[in-house]
Amino acid sequence: MTCNSEWKEIQQALYDGQTAQERPDLTTRVFRAKLQDLKYQLFKRKIFGHVAAHVDVVEFQKRGLPHVHMLIIFKSGHKLNTTSEIDKFENANAIIHDHILKAHNKVKMDIQFTEEEKMDQLYNCHINVEVCSGITVVKYLYKYIYMGHDRVAVHITQDDEPRQVDEIKQFQDARWVSAQEAMWRICEFGLNDISPAVINLQLHLPNKQFVSYHASQNLQKLLLWDHVSKTMLTEYFTMCATSEKARQFLYREFPEHYVWNKRDKIWTERHKIGVIGRISVVSPIEEERYYEKLLLNHVRGPTSFRHLLTFNGIECSTFKEAAQKRGLLEADQSIFNCMNEAITFQMPNELRRLFAIILVHCAPTDVRVLWDTYFDAMSEDFKRDANTSIRQRVSKTLLSLRVLLESMGKDINSYDLPTIPSYDANIENNCSREIQDEMSIQIPEEDQDAELKLNDDQRKAFSMILSSIQKAEGGIFFIDGPGGTGKTFLYRALLAHLRLRKHIALATATSGVAAGIMPGGRTAHSRFKIPINSDEASECSISKQSAAAELLRRAQLIIWDEAPMAKKWAIENVDKLLKDVMGNDKDFGGKVIVFGGDFRQVLPVVPKATVYQTILASLVNSYLWGRIKKITLSINMRSKNDPQFSKFLLSVGNGEEPMDDEGNIKIPDDMVIEYDNEENSLKRHIAAIFPSLARNAYSAEYMTNRAILTPKNEHVDKLNDKLISMFPGEEQIFNSFDEAIDQTNINYDVDFLNSLTPTGLPPHKLRL
């Protein structure tokens, strides 16, 4: 439900000339009133049926107006599971009209069902309703409605503050709080609501509870204080020991009948029902704590930890032994209970990790039944679309489990699981092929003695990097230098030095153009299988046992050019990958990594982002940046005969060039070609870049050492036509042959087809 500034309750209360945004008191109070009315219709009048549970979160858009996300779960018998059950709500007059239009306002609802059935009603605001079935959908919906508030980047300056500032320190990470949200909070309106309330129950082993205290408190006296030893669990035992009524309930059922007083640390009887108790999540890897939870879920009215450990008058030494004697571990029932509980809120990758933990620590009696039961839940994220086969899902799920089990020191082949299709049979061949391809990269002749041609800055960097490789101590380097300072030349020298000695050195870059400049270069996303939309939670899609992983293990050097263009999460994903592949916690698994680039040029592309968000995604904001050794190249080899031009480029990149009020800089007069009209200026431009063109037209060196750059394709075509007309020799014209191949049988106009200029293809009329 979204606030509508045109609501009559708002418009009628505005003063002349006012807008709704200028009256946050009105918009917030009217929206809350309508929200409360909507809740009344849904939860009290039950217009869609009896509600078992609901949660809603109020959020505020950048423009300030509030909206609410609401998730509703109906009771059995009232759920909309089939088309016929949804159909009964199609008659607006019979259902919605009778219930809602009796209220004081009119409503416009756009209700969208999974079967794509829609109906329009009246509430005079946007309400989008989706009917979802299945607990797996609800998991994602809960994460969506709790996605959090908007952020804002802000910087406050004074008129006399110098223009050159540190971009990192300039922008502050902050909350966006609109006037409407501020008014909402001032009025102390609730930002979220959940029904029934969920009480998280503490779980701890004897004398292993958390204790909070002030820094100034005496710890010895604190431990002697009886109040410290009291927890939800210990006082549950106390209530069971003193109250016959309390002994009827399991620990998780206790909050339904008793209220926990945090200050006095005591349970008192509850007079209003409508809460749910939930014991903290525990993994089987925690062993005793896990078995303690298992006992609490089955033993009613325990009076102490000792009571939980006792069965048939015999006190057991561990909670696991007590669970076994009570028959709670027979037939793997506890394992199924654990997985069933996890499925309700854990994502597939977390379920696979839990499954691996169960295999290692719980010794299930029938692994194949366990696999068959929970395969769908564990492989849900691999089911991208309807074309994904079961074979592919099985293969990806088992590969994920293989890696998890090996990290715990176990072999997947020791468990009764399906075999990975075609994986084991081909891995050795694939590995040999990957390494052979890398070893067979041709080293260009000009690179074989490149290390002898390095300038002082390059030679210093070359020696430092080689020293780290020879000592096998690992290291992360960043080659910083503006364009023309010879970063690529240094990379090629390093690659040639190692490859001539039959070592493996991998060349990557953020962009395909930069990767193509280095022999054997590939994009980083291709080499490391980095997710396109990488974040701190994503992982590279390379298995620890794959051929690609073996190649990474054998590589002595990895180069990543144009690193400033990559988002920091992509680089951090590679850090996680190499730690996993190398089996250690060193940065990048102890490999020697050389990053390079120029932060003055291109930063990561973050769509619709603020400057702060772009900087946040940059490598300089990664936890790795402080551990990287920075090497600066300052000698501009490309313009060494024109130091003034090199100095100008640096001053522009460093933000040191004077700017006008609009942020524009003045280009020096000796770099500018005078403009009077387009035709004359174009001739002067060509003459400046291609002097004596007719005399040098057949010189390859002359032609390949100069170019005119322009941002628009139409200008490219115009310049090319102009230049070609100036070339000596007889002109040849070639026309393309266009034919429309379209199943719709539309007759496209030939002139229209000839006007198209697809990327990578010559124009319709090619002049040579």
Image: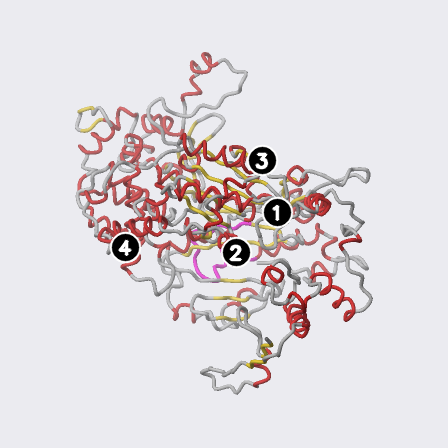
Query: Disc 3 or 4, which lies upstream in sequence?
Result: 4
Disc 3/disc 4 C-alpha distance (Å): 55 Å
Helix, strand or loop status at disc 4:
helix
Helix, strand or loop status at disc 2:
helix
How packed mark 2 is, by other alpha carbons closer than 10 Å (few <14, some 14-19, many 20 or more), is few
The answer to whether residue 593 is left or right of residue 634 is left
Say which residue label 1 marks. Answer: 484
Give the answer, above or below, for where 498 lies relative to 110: above
Disc 2/disc 3 C-alpha distance (Å): 27 Å
* Colour mapping: secondary structure
Disc 1/disc 2 C-alpha distance (Å): 16 Å
Residue 394: mark: 4
Query: Disc 2 or 3, which lies upstream in sequence?
Result: 3
Residue 149: % across, % down: 58, 47
Query: Disc 1 or 3, which lies upstream in sequence?
Result: 3
Disc 4/disc 2 C-alpha distance (Å): 37 Å
Say which amino acid is labelled 4. Val
Disc 1/disc 3 C-alpha distance (Å): 15 Å
Residue appearing at x 62%, y 45% in the figure: 637
Say which amino acid is labelled 2. Val
Say which residue label 3 marks. Answer: 456
Say which amino acid is labelled 3. Asp
Which residue is more in the foreground, 577 or 438? Answer: 438
Mark 1 or 3, closer to the camera: 3
Disc 4/disc 1 C-alpha distance (Å): 50 Å
Mark 4 or 1, closer to the camera: 1
Residue span colored magenta: 38-57
Say which amino acid is labelled 1. Gly
